[in-house]
Every structure is written in C-alpha cells, then in structure tokens.
Image (spheres, rainbow, N blue to C red):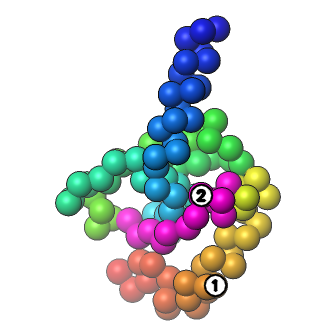
Amino acid sequence: MKTLTADKLDFDTNADQWKPVLLYYEEKYCPAYIVEEDERMISLFMMKGATLSEGEVLITEKSKVKMESITAVELHQFSRQFGKGFLSVLREKGYMDEKDAPGAGS
C-alpha cells in the first residue's frame, strides 16, 4: 500500500511539471502532456479517458507530430467532460477548416 501511495504521489508531482498540449497524431487529436523533449525527439503522455490514471507513452521525432498549447485547467476540464470544449480550442486556433488542420496536405 505504501508503494502504491508513493507511486501515486510521484506521478502527481511529475504531472504538475509536464506541459499540456492538444496533440495531432495519426490523423486524430488527443489531450497529452509533453514529458521530455530535446532538439529532435519528444516524449509524450497521451491520456486515455477522463483522468491521468490511464494513458499511453509516445516517443517520436518532433517532426512526426503537431501540437497546440492548451492550459492544464482546460485539459482537465474538457477531459472530465469527455471531450466537450476541445472543439472550441481547435476553432480558436483555426483548425476547424480541414485545409488548416495540422498535417493537412502532408
């Protein structure tokens, strides 16, 4: 039990340091966090569901993904609402027109 609690606390502490983004990868958008990056590579935690308790780690070249900044408050709020609100972010960024979407024409 102590190990589980320590792991949870460590996860929560690290998550506070990650940068929230709306990730465009494999022709879809998903909420994610930048965990680590250098000049060429990036490591992301892609959320699966409405909380940070489940997700997928993606390690790839930066050139393979597109990202839009989003606040941590927006990411958590929209995720808890099962995605409601993310479209307004995309609309604000000008991605509602398919030709303007990240990756369009590539």
Q: Is residue 1 left or right of residue 36?
A: right
For residue 28, what is the image quadrant?
bottom right
Find residue 72 and name its label. Answer: 2
Residue found at x 28% / y 67%: 63
Indicate left or right for 84 with 40 as reference.
Answer: right
Kind of residue at disc 2: Ala
Q: Can residue 25 be seen in this view?
A: yes
Return the mark for residue 45. Answer: none
Classify 10 Å Cα crowding around label 1: few (below 14), some (14-19), many (20 and above).
few
Camera-side residue of 6 and 52: 6
Image spot of residue 66 (x, y percent): 41, 70
- Which of discs 2 and 1 lies nearer the camera? The answer is 2
Quarter of the image holding residue 85? bottom right
In percent of width and height, residue 56 lies at 51, 42
Residue under the point 40% across and 47% down = 35
Q: Give the range drawn in magenta.
A: 65-76
Lower sequence index among marks 2 and 1:
2
Residue sitting at x 62%, y 46%: 48
Whole-percent x and y of residue 86?
A: 67, 70
Contact, mark 2 vs mark 1 (Cβ under 8 Å)? no
Residue 49 point in image, percent of width and height: 69, 47
Q: Can residue 58 be seen in this view?
A: no
- Dot 2, crowdedness within 10 Å: few (<14), some or many (≥20)? some
Q: What element carries label 1?
A: helix
Q: Distance between the residues labelled 2 and 1?
A: 18 Å
Q: Name the outermost residue toward the left.
A: 39
How many numbered tags mark residues here?
2
- The answer to whether residue 38 is above or below residue 7 is below
The front one of 71 and 30 is 71
Residue identified by numbered label 1: 91
- Say what secondary structure mark 2 lies in: helix
